[in-house]
Image: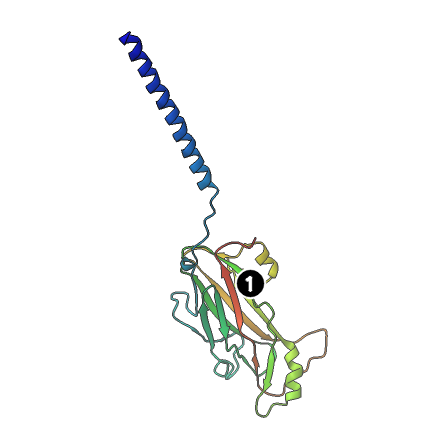
Amino acid sequence: MDKYKSRSIMIIILLVGVISLSIGLAVFSSTLNIKSGTTVSPDPSKFKIAASASKDNTTSLQISPSAYVLPSGLISNSSTATITNSGNMVTISNVKPYFTAPRQIIEYIFYVHNIGEYPAYLKSYSQFLLPRCVSLEGTTDSLVQQACNDINTGICLLDFNGRCNNSQSDLDKNNYVIPVGGSTKISVRLNYSLHSNRDNVVADGPFTVEFDNINIVFGSQPTS
């Protein structure tokens, strides 16, 4: 009798153990399913970019212009541009080149550094820059305003092979990204050009060209 009683107790204990284990596995499985469906959003405080005139630091906030064609005074009379870093946006202001003759090109070069913990995807930038030409003393304003139509502008975002990306379609492919700890070179190029398919009006003296601020926006995730 005691032997049968002992067996019954053992069977009951085993059944309780199996039931408890089954419940535990079910709860564990349920917990895993809940966690697997959770979406983790990037921490905005860990996303950070910083533009600089230097490829080696993030503290040089004044961009000195450079030129392909360098007549007297072309660089010294062009304004130094200013960099402002604000969250995920870089702003370039006071872009004001000085021209004296056609075929002159002024360029402002700077670097965007990814100093955060997420890749930095390019979201948007000021693709079309509208020039405002200002005649200087001794220069005929009407000629300057006509010559202003021959000012070509563009923002060239150099990829890691040194190729220029300046098409909005490049952004749609999410193929312009700065890796963590990396940087990219950006050029704002301004060209006083001549056109072969029309009569060109040439200014009779020096003039400057002004632009609105240039904004470049990055994000921590690709564009959906």
Residue furthest to the front: 1
Is 224 on the left-hand or right-hand side of 119?
right
At horizontal 57% and vertical 74% (from top left) the residue drawn is: 190
Q: Position of residue 7 (x, y in %)?
A: 31, 12
Q: Is residue 213 above or below residue 46?
A: below
Q: Is residue 224 above or below residue 144?
A: above
Name the residue beneath numbered marker 1. 124
Number of numbered callouts drawn: 1
User: Looking at the image, can residue 123 be seen?
Assistant: yes
Res. 193 image quadrant: bottom right
Q: For numbered disc 1, what is the local secondary structure?
A: strand
Residue in front for this viewpoint, 186 or 5: 5
Is 167 on the left-hand or right-hand side of 50?
right
Quadrant of the image for the N terminus? top left
Q: Position of residue 155 (x, y in %)?
A: 56, 67
Q: Amino acid at mark 1?
A: Ser
Q: Is residue 144 above or below residue 14?
A: below
Is 180 on the left-hand or right-hand side of 72?
left
Q: Position of residue 128 (x, y in %)?
A: 61, 70
Residue furthest to the left: 2
At horizontal 46% and vertical 72% (from top left) the residue drawn is: 83
